Image (tube, rainbow, N blue to C red):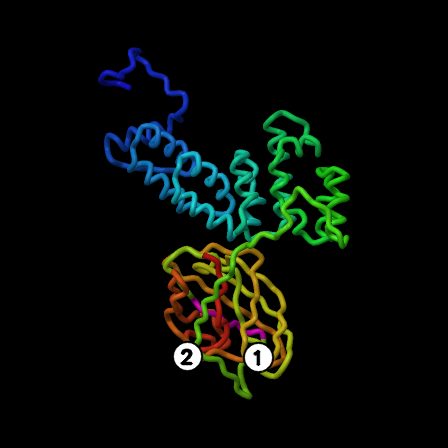
Amino acid sequence: MFYGDLAEGQSVIHIPDVEPAAFLILLKYMYSDEIELEADTVLATLYAAKKYIVPALAKACVSFLETSLEAKNACVLLSQSRLFEEPELTQRCWEVIDAQAELALLSEGFCEIDKPTLEIILQRETLHIRELVVFQAALNWAKAECWRQGMPVTPHNQRAVLGKALYLVRIPSMSLQEFADGPAQSDLLTLKETHSIFLWFTATNKPQLNFPVVKRAGLVPQKCHRFQSAAYRSNQWRYRGRCDSIQFAVDSRIFIAGLGLYGSSGGKAEYSVKIELKRHGSVLAQNPTKFLSDGSSSTFPVWFEHPVQVEQDTFYTVSAVLDGNELSYFGQEGMTEVQCGKVTFQFQCSSDSTNGTGVQGGQIPELVFFC
């Protein structure tokens, strides 16, 4: 641009496609080897680094984006990573979108993506999500697209901007109740489509539909079991609203979906439980719920409302406060380190534990996660 056979002839060179702040970051790196990135300008800086072929700065931008990646910005970053041809960042985005699909698709960022990215997300087989939420997310995107195109937000216009993407929503995989309360009353479908889908749900001879009918496969939950055996005694394990808690750390990023807990050792019984996940004393997720045990030494899953992203090499605390009259099984021969596929878990005792659970024994035998 400035020197050699391809140099510009003018004394002032306009660069309309690069933001001034990003260009300054580029210049600073080229002259001083210093990289100062900020969330507001990192995408523009990545564009500049790609345009002027500065791979070290581009790599630093991608690393910054991976560190700041979360459900609310994953869809936007997926769109950008495809534009910039950054396969590693694309893969990280998919990991977040798959595991935290409901949070990602209902985020404001989802409404900002381009249509090709919308279509590949709606096609995704491994989204951990209810199809009714996928339909609502598609409606939200269509509403935003109508605004971008200066069109009134009407069902007709929303359908027009969605085009073929509407037929990527697996409406027949919803329950009949979900369909009746949602898509059937949205005015987005034609009367013929609504009638055909109702027949598909209820008739013996099902009509042909333009929508995929098979549910998404979703993600298969993995389990980290930290005890080598389970036992019960006549005077334990007892609950009076005290807390069972354990700390854990992992060597790569995962998403904690829930806990596996022991149930009654004296036959069928129901427990109320509040599960909680904390990092450095700050609550990341909690869920009060109930579970029914069958008297066996099996573990029984209890889920958080949404999977929670857990970073590597940091200790987190999981807790369960159970309430039930029945004594339960408890774990023995606990392990401080457990290998689950490609993920290594480390466990240590928690000061929050007031009911006896620790590394060697007690409750919370399993962590249920996606990776």
Q: Residue at x 28, y 19 (%)?
A: 1
Which sits in the foreground, 327 or 170?
Answer: 170
Name the secondary structure under disc 2: strand
Q: Earlier in the sequence, mark 1 or mark 2?
A: 1
Give percent across and percent down for residue 325: 63, 80
Q: Which residue is mark 1?
A: 296
Q: Is residue 32 above or below residue 204?
A: above
Q: Residue furthest left?
A: 4
Question: Mark 1 or 2, which is nearer the eye?
Answer: 1
Q: Residue furthest front?
A: 205
Q: What type is the residue that disc 1 sits on? A: Ser
In the image, residue 235 above or below residue 199 = below
Q: Residues within 10 Å of mark 2 (few under 14, many from 20)?
A: some
Instruction: Identify the amino acid type marked 2.
Output: Glu
Distance between the alpha carbons at the discs numbered 1 and 2: 19 Å
Question: In the figure, is residue 347 to the left or right of 4?
Answer: right
Instruction: Give left or right: position of 46 versus 326.
Output: left
Determine the image quadrant of residue 36: top left
Of residues 260 and 132, the one nearer the viewer is: 132
Residue 336 to residue 204: above or below: below
The kind of secondary structure element at disc 1 is loop
Which residues are the magenta region? 241-247
Q: Is residue 214 above or below residue 335?
A: above
Residue 146's x, y, as percent?
63, 30
What residue is drawn where x is 65% and y is 26%?
151
In the image, residue 281 lies at what x, y percent? 46, 60
Count all numbered tags in the image, as a single digit.
2
Pointer 2: what residue? 333
Quadrant where the C terminus lies? bottom left
Q: Position of residue 159 (x, y in %)?
A: 67, 34
